Image (tube, helix red, strand yellow):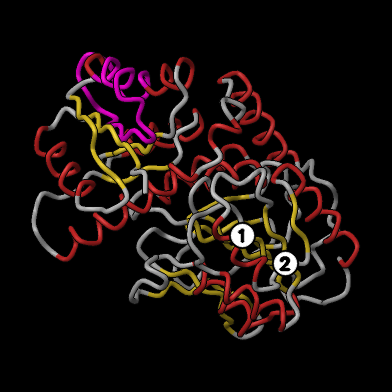
């Protein structure tokens, strides 16, 4: 078996050594080189032609974001960003995903513990996902023009303030949209949510993401969308025109309080090695109100949520899966499709329109008390 060739770029010798130990302990990958800064990394990348690069955000001589832009322009390679948990680094991390990085991990704590074992599993899974990604097919098509982003923000704010949505077609329904995603999901979610009108039914989202980043992610999306996007809070009502993102250290579940839908945050063990887990969200949808659910499975490695999505469909939900060609990694949608969970398999750029069209057709069938 040909091993995945990895280069780590990080100014910390301790981190470089730790990543080398983790990666070289895996049977299917090897660390072919490490570099303390991008200038040294440039020559090593040319020499070794790695399959995946891990890239620190804060480094001397050239920061990770600037180096990533150069990699994407001159030598496109799957990149996993390594980010310290700060507000600034959260913003930069999401910008790196917009520029083409496949995924990110947080900087590890340098101790030997069960947490380190979990970290090793996390980063090696992300390296495998990056290697398996469709990055070379999408090339630089996901790069974002800053002027377009500023225009989208201004337009979204204007529509929120003036109420320029597409009417109130969905306000009289109990319909809910549940979305699961992982590798590549941050950009897939942005592509879908920014296309939705402000009168959408409520949306609940589980995106595999570390604690500390989900609020920044929600805030970033909220600036771009007509709907209100926020990190979910325990016990809050699930309202139309809102999207609720699972916090990075809690499972998100749909629950009821009297006649109202609410968010329930569960602090339990990882499910399918993930916390938050798509399986947990989709299972709660089956238990609470499957016939009112539209389930969506987006890009991601593994099979988290596939079984629950199939159960949700059997109970009456309508499900959409992202297709292989538009997925960064086709693992999660593929597993759901294989189990017969999908009513539709669609490219990413058609999901939002199909969702709105479907809701328009069935919009008035179920009364809601709000």
Image x and y of residue 239, in percent: 64, 64
In the picture shown, does residue 41 fall above or below 343?
A: above
Span highlighted in magenta in the image: 41-67
Q: Secondary structure at mark 2?
A: loop
Q: Secondary structure at mark 1?
A: helix
Determine if the magenta segment contains residue 45. Answer: yes
Residue drawn where x is 19% and y is 25% of the image: 35
Image x and y of residue 209, in percent: 41, 53
- Residue on which the image places disc 1: 333
Left or right: residue 144 versus residue 35 is right
For this rendering, which residue is in front, 179 or 225? 179
Residue drawn where x is 20% and y is 52% of the image: 25
Left or right: residue 271 versus residue 281 is left
For this rendering, which residue is in front, 303 or 284? 303
For the C terminus, the quadrant is: bottom right
Quadrant hosting residue 107? top left
Q: Mark 2 packing: few (<14 Cα in 10 Å), some, or many (20+)? A: many
Residue drawn where x is 19% and y is 43% of the image: 19
Q: Mark 1 packing: few (<14 Cα in 10 Å), some, or many (20+)? A: many
In the picture shown, does residue 158 fall above or below 124?
A: above
For this rendering, which residue is in front, 229 or 118? 118
Image x and y of residue 293, in percent: 71, 72
Tags 1 and 2 touching, CB below 8 Å: yes
Disc sitting over residue 85 in the figure: none
Left or right: residue 311 versus residue 146 is right
Q: CA distance from mark 1 to mark 2?
A: 9 Å
- Residue on which the image places disc 2: 342
Left or right: residue 325 versus residue 61 is right
């Amino acid at each position: 078996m040909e091993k995945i060739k990895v280069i780590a770029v990080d100014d910390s010798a301790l981190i470089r050594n730790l990543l080398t130990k983790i990666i070289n302990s895996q049977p299917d990958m090897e660390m072919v080189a490490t570099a303390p800064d991008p200038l040294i990394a440039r020559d090593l990348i040319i020499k070794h032609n790695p399959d995946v690069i891990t890239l620190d955000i804060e480094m001397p001589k050239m920061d990770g974001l600037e180096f990533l832009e150069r990699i994407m322009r001159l030598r496109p390679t799957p990149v996993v960003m390594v980010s310290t948990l700060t507000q600034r680094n959260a913003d930069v991390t999401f910008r790196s995903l917009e520029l083409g990085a496949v995924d990110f991990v947080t900087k590890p704590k340098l101790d030997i513990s069960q947490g380190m074992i979990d970290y090793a599993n996390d980063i090696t899974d992300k390296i495998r996902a990056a290697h398996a990604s469709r990055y070379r097919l999408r090339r630089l098509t996901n790069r974002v023009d800053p002027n377009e982003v500023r225009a989208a923000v201004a337009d979204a704010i204007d529509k929120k303030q003036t109420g320029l949505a597409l009417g109130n077609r969905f306000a009289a329904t109990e319909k809910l949209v549940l979305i699961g995603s992982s590798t590549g999901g941050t950009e897939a979610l942005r592509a879908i949510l920014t296309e939705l009108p402000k009168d959408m039914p409520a949306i609940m989202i589980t995106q595999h993401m570390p604690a500390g980043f989900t609020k920044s992610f929600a805030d970033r999306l909220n600036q771009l969308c007509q709907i209100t996007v926020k990190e979910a809070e325990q016990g809050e009502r699930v309202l139309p025109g809102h999207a609720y993102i699972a916090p990075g250290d809690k499972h998100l579940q749909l629950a009821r309080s009297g006649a109202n839908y609410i968010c329930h945050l569960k602090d339990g063990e990882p499910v399918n090695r993930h916390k938050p887990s798509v399986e947990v969200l989709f299972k709660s949808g089956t238990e609470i109100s499957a016939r009112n659910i539209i389930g969506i499975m987006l890009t991601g490695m593994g099979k988290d949520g596939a079984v629950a999505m199939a159960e949700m469909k059997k109970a009456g939900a309508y499900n959409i899966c992202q297709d292989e060609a538009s997925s960064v990694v086709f693992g999660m949608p593929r597993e759901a499709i294989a189990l017969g969970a999908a009513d539709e398999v669609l490219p990413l750029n058609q999901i939002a329109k199909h969702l709105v069209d479907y809701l328009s057709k069935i919009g008035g069938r179920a009364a809601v008390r709000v």
